[in-house]
Amino acid sequence: MELDPQTDLTFTRKIDVSPALLWECWTTPEHIKAFFVPKPHKVTACEIDLRTGGRFNTTFEVEGNTMENNGVFLELIPQRKLVFTDTYSEGWKPNPDPFMTAIVEFEDDGAGGTIYTATARHRSAESRQNHEDMGFFDGWGTVVDQLAAYAKTL
C-alpha cells in the first residue's frame, strides 16, 4: 500500500501480544468496549458482522455526549489485516458525512509479538489535517496502549 502524506495518517508499534490475540480483541464486541476509545471516554455499544460489507457499528460516550459511528468492513485477512470505513453503513448505504477509512495491520514479529500498524485514510488533505489536530497520534497511541494492556489480561 502506498501512503499519501497529504491524506493519510499512520504509525507503527511493536506490541508484546500475538497477532491472534490482537485480532480477537479487534473482532469481538465485548473486547472492543475495553480499548477502542481513550479513557475516560467509553464504548457503550458495539455490533460486528465480521465479513466484507458486514457492519462495524460503535457507540461512544465522550464528555457526556453520545456519538454513533456506523460503518462496514472492506477487507478482512484473519490475524493480519482489518479495513473498515464509515463511508458506508451496512448494505453499502452511503453515509452523508464520512470521516475516514481505517487499516489495522498485525505482522508477526517472530518472537511472539506483533508489529502493529494503524492507518487512517481521509478524503481530503483538510480532513486529514483536522484528524491530526484532533489528536490522531495521541488518541490512537492511547488506544493501542489500552489494547496491549487489555490483551495481556486475557
Image (cartoon, rainbow, N blue to C red):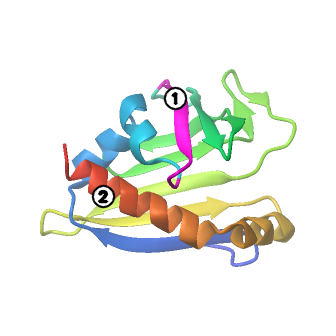
Observer-nearest of 16 and 63: 63
The residue lying furthest to the left in this view is 111
Residue at 30%, 58% (x, y): give it: 148
Residue 92 % position (x, y): 72, 27
Tell me which segment is drawn in magenta.
Answer: 38-49
Residue that sits furthest to the bottom in the current view:
5
The residue positioned 67% from the left and 69% from the top of the image is 8
Which numbered tag is attached to residue 57?
A: none
Is 83 left or right of 27, judged from the image as shown?
Answer: right
Badge 1: residue crowd in 10 Å (few <14, some 14–19, many ≥20): many
62 over 28 or under it: above or below: below
Q: Earlier in the sequence, mark 2 or mark 1?
A: 1
Q: Give the residue type that dot 1 points to.
A: Cys
Residue with the mark numbered 1 = 46
* In magenta segment, residue 47: yes
Q: For residue 18, which quarter of the picture?
A: bottom left
Q: Residue at x 37, y 64 (%)?
A: 116
What amino acid is found at the position of numbered circle 2 in the picture?
Answer: Ala
Residue 145 at what x, y percent from top left? 38, 63
Question: How many C-alpha atoms fall within 10 Å of the one at disc 2: few (<14), some, or many (≥20)?
Answer: many
